[in-house]
Amino acid sequence: MGCLVVLFALISPRLALILTWLANDILSRAFGSWLLPLIGFFILPWTTLTYAWLWNWGEGREVTGWEWILVVVAVIADLGALGGARRRRD
């Protein structure tokens, strides 16, 4: 199931978020509530997905060290997608 979710994440991070939410409870454990993943679904889907996956990866159940670099890359990807959509609309 994990490889399938990664494939969907490359196509659409929102679809991967839905599959992650349906398959397990990583999102609710990583964020502690339903509000942040819902906001992340609409505004920063790559960041939400990356944070949740990295939070679940490893022993500590937290994002530490070099993992934050991947979260920052996801933020940049989200902002790039938002900027590209705005530029196409204008």
Image (spheres, rainbow, N blue to C red):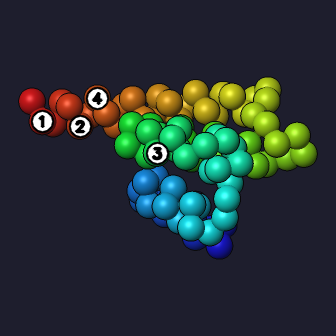
Amino acid of disc 4? Gly
Percent position of residue 66, x then y? 75, 29
Q: Residues within 10 Å of mark 3 (few under 14, many from 20)?
A: some
Q: Which residue is mark 3?
A: 38
Location of the N terminus by quadrant is bottom right
Q: CA distance from mark 2 to mark 1?
A: 6 Å
Element on which disc 3 rests: helix
Q: CA distance from mark 3 to mark 2?
A: 20 Å
Amino acid of disc 2? Ala
Location of the C terminus by quadrant is top left
Do the numbered discs 4 and 2 sit on residues whose CB atoms are within 8 Å? yes
Q: Which mark is residue 89?
A: 1
Q: Residue shown at 55%/46% (left/top)?
A: 34
Q: Which residue is mark 2?
A: 85
Do the numbered discs 3 and 1 sit on residues whose CB atoms are within 8 Å? no
Q: Residue shown at 26%/34% (left/top)?
A: 84
The answer to whether one can see residue 51 in this image is: yes
Percent position of residue 17, x then y? 51, 56
Q: Residues within 10 Å of mark 4 (few under 14, many from 20)?
A: few
Do the numbered discs 4 and 3 sit on residues whose CB atoms are within 8 Å? no
Nearer to me, 36 or 18: 36
Do the numbered discs 2 and 1 sit on residues whose CB atoms are within 8 Å? yes
Question: Left or right of 84: which side holds 39?
Answer: right
Q: Earlier in the sequence, mark 3 or mark 1?
A: 3
Amino acid of disc 3? Leu
Percent position of residue 7, x then y? 53, 64
Element on which disc 4 rests: helix
